[in-house]
Amino acid sequence: MMENLLIEQVRVVDPANGRDEICDFVVRDGRMQDPGCDVSGLRRIDGRGKLLAPGFWDVHVHFRDPGNPAAETMQTGVAAAAAGGFTHVVTMPNTVPAGDSVEWLRNQIDADLPVRIHPSCCATRGRLGKELADLDTLALAGAAAFTDDGAMVADDGLMRGAMVIAKAHRLPVMDHAVVPSIAGPGVVRDCPAARKYGWPVFPAEAELAAVRRDIRLCEETGCATHIQHLSCAGSVAMIREARSRGLPVTAEATPHHMALAAEDIPDDDGNYRMNPPLGIRDDVRAIREGVMDGTLSVFATDHAPHAPETKSHGFMKAPFGIIGLETAIGVTWKIMVETCGMRVMDWVCGWTVAPAKLLGLDAPSLSSGRLADMVLIDLGHPWVVRPDEFKSKSRNTPFAGRQLPVKPINTWLAGKSNGCL
């Protein structure tokens, strides 16, 4: 049903229109209305102490569909996204089979779900890094971006070729920037837990060399290049310098890399294993500074579900990755807004305007006349992370038991409520 509602005295934050004010907000027949319009017969919501923003976008999620329904399905992934405050997500193609076909792409796009999926497709066939996928065909069929996420496109010639084709279609190339030959068996940055258990150390140069390569190819091709899940201070510095020269390079900050350091790993806990791994404290500081000064303009979760039993046998036996959709708003608000003093307008922009711009899509907004794509966030709702209550099928989070200060309570997509409120 198309929504008809009045949200009374809510804080409206709309970066696309430079709007941050407390007011009544009206939606009629699913479309946002001008202030002062007729409000008779509308469902009323008390908006005091709440924030209304365009629905949030996440440009980096893994739904494991097809191939691994024990970890996540498209339906449970979307449920987690909606519960987390997201209305648009970009799915990664490291599924089984890999996302390198039009059939795979259409199965993602055509799903009738309360969150809109923008599928990225493989840069190389089968994500094997040996030959390019049919990028022209995939672009014309609706691919949102190209990436072999989960693995780097390590061959410079292939990556350059992917960038040339992507630029012709005005699409970004995203890269999992970790050089496998340098990373070797590394799984963690140097920290007390790594030394205690003898875990192989992941050298920072594995990421730095990849970012350096990607920036060089971006400069050669002019392709919009997006570096996924930065974890190193040196990477932030390189992105900052490249952007200062006007290169079309963006990079994302993930909640876990801005909130946690390798020194925070408490024990032999597989929920702290991710790729790239948590940086040391200097890296965390640099990532936060990069967000604050606009170097890292895009927030993204890298939501990576794994069936609970796979994460329960210690750090070395656990697969890489953690879930993040249902904790992202709370974590990033706590770290960036409350701790670092980030403007709320800029925080919302990192989850809305910036990711849409990366994809070459219109900026999300709360403009009158548009179908309502929006999220309502309770700013006075501290809550404790209890993974057993997640909509996701997986439970692999390092934030279990932590208190977060704010919580999304409803989303609307194209004028329809997800039903939480």
Image (spheres, rainbow, N blue to C red):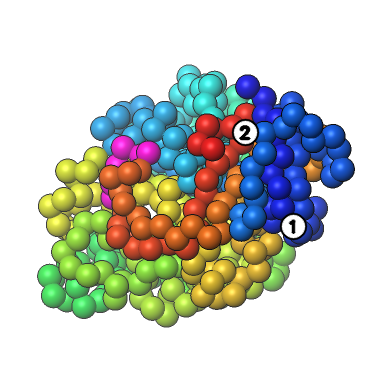
Query: In terms of secondary structure, where does tag 1 sit?
Result: strand
Percent coordinates x, y for residue 330 in the rendering: 47, 58
At 29% across and 72% down in the image, what residue appears?
264
Q: Is residue 36 left or right of residue 224?
A: right
| Residue type highlighted by circle 2 | Leu
Among the 4 quarters of the image, the one containing residue 307: top left
Q: Is residue 84 above or below residue 13?
A: above
Query: In terms of secondary structure, where does tag 2 sit?
Result: strand
Total label count?
Answer: 2
- The residue indicated by pointer 2 is 413
Task: Identify the mark nearer the N-term, 2 or 1.
Answer: 1
Q: Is residue 125 left or right of residue 418?
A: left
Please state which of residues 336 and 41 is positioned toward the viewer in this rendering. 41
**Span highlighted in magenta in the image:** 391-396
Residue 51: give its label: none
Q: Is residue 58 left or right of residue 129?
A: right
| Residue type highlighted by circle 1 | Ile
Percent coordinates x, y for residue 327 in the rendering: 43, 53
2 or 1: mark nearer the eye: 1
